[in-house]
Amino acid sequence: MLSDKIAHFLKQHPEFERLQDLFRDLMPCWLVGGCLRDLFLERPINDVDIACAGDPTAVARRWTRQVGGRWFWLDKERRQSRALLPTGITVDFAPLRAETIATDQALRDFTINSLAFPLQQPLSAQQVLDPLNGIQHLADRKLLPCSTRSFSDDPLRMLKGIRHAVTLKLAVDPETKRQLLHHRDLIQNIAGERCQEELSKILAAEDIRTAVQLLLESGLLAALCGEPGGKFHRDELSADMEALGQAIDQFNQQVRAQFSEEQIEIRRIDQLLAQLLRIYQPANLSRLLHDRLRLSRERQQLIQQLQETPAAELLALAESVSTPRRQALVFEALQPFAEQMLFFQGWQQQRFAPQRLIALSQAFSSLQQFNRIPPLLSAKEISQLLNNAKGRILGQLEKKLKHAEMTGEINSPEEAKSWLKKQNI
């Protein structure tokens, strides 16, 4: 039973018993939302939500100090705050959204998140409050909104619902899909940063096929990106995204030691988003990335560059060059997003085994100085050879020298000097 799982969780985290003692004579409070859902599904608990019949701020701050955590405001006006515990658990405090816990539960997003459990002693006498049948919906793996007002009250819940469906493996019933379609345009009223955060979480999910299908079927992808400019079949697009997701995951397993988990997740999201948009072809990609999704400048640049195909010569050289220096020079020529570009284009064109990409990247890492490969000849040497050539000409010659080296036309400083003397400068 869920009550037993809750009691076991609280026993494992005695700091919550101290919290019960602090609230006991002040106001009722309840565990609510996702932590109860995850306990039922036997998922790890990292976030705990506590709803209180009053302002919980003073107790939350006092308790956080007592357990050695860090407290801060989430929304001062609404008296919502957060505690970061030494155990790594995040605890959010908020007053009820209505006069009673039952009314508060009815105002939540989905029935699976509408559960509540009184933090009152004795815990063994408490029962899970489940007026909307959320436990049964969890058991049946169904995603249902708490009311017909759920999406209009907060349109971001539509994207959250798709995230829940793909991460928790929940079925979205026809009525819920109908409500999503009906309210889809309301997502345009939500700040781009919040939409981008939810969309990223959806693309980070393992089941990317279902994620894309739901984004299309709900109309939310069109509401976010506008109508598609490309011609595609929904099932083919979903299958294509699934195949790319699997290829990314396999590649990431081989390079995991080189990046943090956060970097790996962001790279996966960006490549999947780039592929989705490459096929979808929104009318104004730059405006979508900047104004609607509010991506950082670097991520905007990456996704836009992944829409383009590098010069065929560079891709051919990436496949064929054998010496570490030539590999490093090819990698440099594809910067600033060489590895992502090679992987993305390699997957599109069915070339570049993961080992090849890793070899190119490692060659660059071992030879680069200040994120560039030192040329065979310094600018001073080039200038002296060519009657004190300066400025832009020097930069152009250095670039040409590197290209000649990449193609195998020159292989040493002596050959570089001879090559330069033959140029018509």
Image (cartoon, rainbow, N blue to C red):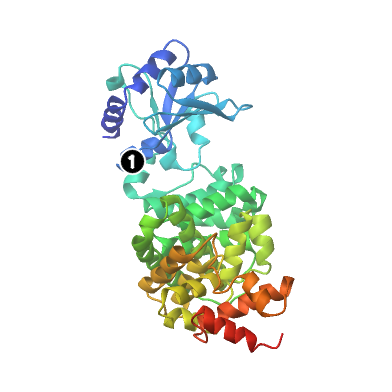
User: Residue 373 versus residue 127: which sits nearer the camera?
Assistant: 373
Q: Is residue 66 above or below residue 266?
A: above
Where residue 303 sits in the image (x, y, percent)?
A: 57, 65
What amino acid type is highlighted by mark number 1? Answer: Pro
Question: Looking at the rendering, in which quadrant would you find the N terminus?
Answer: top left
Q: In this view, does 138 lie to the left or right of 72?
A: left
Q: In this view, does 313 lie above or below 133?
A: below
The residue that label 1 is drawn on is: 44
User: Residue 418 versus residue 310: which sits nearer the camera?
Assistant: 418
Q: In this view, does 139 lie above or below 345?
A: above
Q: Which residue lies furthest to the top in this view?
A: 25
Q: Is residue 223 left or right of residue 248?
A: right
Q: Alpha-carbon neighbours of circle 1 within 10 Å: few (<14), some, or many (≥20)? A: few
Where residue 265 sits in the image (x, y, percent)?
A: 45, 55
Give the quarter of the image for residue 181: bottom right
Question: Looking at the rendering, in which quadrant would you find the C terminus?
Answer: bottom right
Total numbered labels: 1
Where residue 260 sits in the image (x, y, percent)?
A: 42, 51
User: Residue 337 versus residue 268: which sits nearer the camera?
Assistant: 337
Image point (69%, 80%), residue name: 386
Where residue 157 sits in the image (x, y, percent)?
A: 54, 46
Image point (51%, 68%), residue name: 338
Image point (62%, 84%), residue name: 420
Q: What element carries label 1?
A: loop
Q: Is residue 86 left or right of residue 192?
A: left
Report if residue 64 is visible in the image. Answer: yes
Give the quarter of the image for residue 382: bottom right
Report if residue 404 is visible in the image. Answer: no
